[in-house]
């Protein structure tokens, strides 16, 4: 019996792109499902992986000969290992601009490689793939962002998540650990995964000298998830300077292990904080690196709050990636310490504010940041939503609502 596959809602956009573009690059972290997504296109595509050392060696030594031998419909997996083929692919594509010829996958942010951005600019579409969102795990497509921008939050009654929220956050969205039945086995996978990325991929595709620093750096970043990035504090435990630590964080970002979330600020507004926030790219990894279990996390509300905030951030980034719409993500904080966890701008310049709370009790004070941003943005502010572990969508005045966290994946 074949194993059931999780649905990937990015497949629709991939197929659309291949209808009018010669090549599409799917990039995202290792083990998030890039190869599985590409193979969902069917048997009409040949498959070549550069994880195979013999194929990798051939492509590096003779990129022209390698690309000349490719069929017209080929999946090229893990292309970050062979940047030598990009110029050859450009030549082949320019000889025949037929759509849908190549699907590339990469486990690093390849657009940071000059060889790719220079060679394939205008010839390739980039699509980011994330680990699974909750709505993919339960096979029910979500449209939370669309509903918010349409002022159409569902009015149904939800069940409180209680401990289930912690379990979902700690499991994360990578397909493989979700198949494991216990939290300790999931944690083992997450820790082995991070170690593999550091010991193999970072060594192979970067020039980091102090690779041994990376595991501790990842742990420090995990314990700082959903908080302002303070490179000086993080660097204090290493024999490295702040700039070196910042460059290492950029490498981890390039490997899709962490995200820097930009602070929103208006021109000439000196009262707004401009330091970015850090978010671990998957809360299963973050919880494993924190070395914390369910019982301890339930007692540590501060840590739980940070993890739930990163969880919501990741869920919304995942939904945005397949929505077919453009969204820019920020957070808001001013020097009076008034904050909104997420400020999301669509391609029409309209904003959605999201505040996250891991508990079930809410007060009007919890909406202080959303109210300030609503007044600041005026007509550009579409809606503010306080997500909490509750049962109902509740109105809190003009354009402000509280909604259960499970509305992110259960919005019938």
Image (spheres, helix red, strand yellow):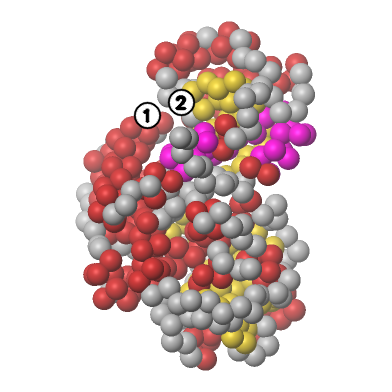
Callout 1: few (<14), some (14-19), or many (20+) C-alpha neighbours within 10 Å? few
Viewer-side residue, 363 vs 85: 363
Query: How far from the left and from the top, in percent, is residue 23?
Result: 67, 30
Labels 2 and 1 touching (C-beta < 8 A): yes
Q: Is residue 138 above or below residue 337?
A: above
Q: Helix or strand or loop: what does disc 2 sit on?
A: helix
Residue at x 61% of width, y 61% of height: 142
Q: Which residue is mark 1?
A: 204
Q: Is residue 247 above or below residue 232?
A: above
Residue 71 falls left or right of residue 224: right
Viewer-side residue, 219 vs 133: 133
Viewer-side residue, 62 vs 78: 78
Asked if residue 30 lies in the magenta stretch, the reply is: yes
Query: How far from the left and from the top, in percent, is residue 235?
Result: 28, 55
Query: How far from the left and from the top, in percent, is residue 141?
Result: 61, 57
Residue at x 73% of width, y 40% of height: 16
Viewer-side residue, 358 vs 215: 358
Query: How far from the left and from the top, in percent, is residue 152?
Result: 70, 74
Residue at x 50% of width, y 14% of height: 59
Q: Which residue is mark 2?
A: 81
The numbered mark at residue 144 is none
Q: Which residues are magenta?
A: 13-36
Residue 121 seen in render = no
């Amino acid at each position: 019996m074949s194993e059931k596959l999780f649905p990937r809602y990015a497949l629709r956009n991939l197929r659309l792109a291949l209808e009018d573009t010669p090549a599409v690059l799917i990039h995202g972290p290792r083990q998030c499902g890039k190869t599985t997504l590409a193979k969902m296109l069917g048997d009409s595509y040949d498959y070549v992986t550069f994880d195979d050392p013999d194929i990798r060696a051939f492509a590096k030594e003779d990129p022209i000969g390698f690309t000349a031998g490719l069929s017209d419909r080929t999946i090229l997996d893990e292309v970050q290992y062979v940047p030598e083929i990009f110029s050859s692919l450009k030549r082949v594509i320019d000889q025949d601009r037929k759509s849908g010829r190549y699907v590339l996958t990469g486990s690093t942010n390849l657009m940071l490689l000059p060889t790719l951005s220079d060679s394939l600019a205008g010839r390739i579409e980039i699509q980011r793939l994330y680990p699974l969102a909750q709505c993919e795990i339960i096979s029910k497509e979500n449209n939370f962002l669309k509903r918010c921008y349409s002022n159409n939050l569902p009015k149904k009654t939800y069940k409180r998540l209680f401990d289930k929220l912690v379990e979902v956050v700690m499991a994360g969205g990578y397909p493989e650990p979700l198949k494991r039945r216990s939290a300790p086995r999931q944690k083992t996978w997450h820790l082995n995964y991070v170690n593999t990325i550091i010991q193999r991929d970072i060594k192979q595709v970067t020039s980091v000298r102090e690779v041994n620093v990376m595991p501790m750096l990842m742990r420090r970043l995990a314990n700082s998830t959903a908080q302002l990035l303070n490179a000086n504090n993080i660097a204090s435990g290493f024999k490295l300077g702040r700039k070196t630590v910042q460059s290492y964080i950029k490498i981890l970002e390039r490997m899709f292990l962490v995200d820097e979330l930009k602070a929103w600020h208006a021109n000439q507004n000196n009262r707004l904080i401009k330091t970015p926030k850090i978010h671990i790219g998957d809360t299963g990894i973050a919880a494993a690196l924190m070395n914390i279990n369910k019982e301890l996390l339930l007692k540590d509300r501060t840590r739980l709050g940070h993890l739930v905030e990163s969880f919501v951030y990741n869920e919304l980034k995942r939904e945005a990636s397949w929505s077919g719409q453009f969204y820019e993500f920020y957070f808001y904080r001013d020097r009076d310490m008034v904050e909104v966890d997420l400020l999301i701008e669509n391609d029409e310049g309209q904003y959605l504010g999201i505040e996250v709370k891991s508990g079930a009790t809410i007060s009007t004070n919890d909406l202080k940041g959303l109210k300030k941003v609503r007044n600041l943005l005026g007509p550009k502010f579409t809606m503010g939503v306080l997500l909490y572990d509750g049962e109902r969508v509740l109105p809190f005045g003009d354009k402000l609502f509280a909604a259960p966290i499970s509305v992110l994946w259960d919005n019938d």
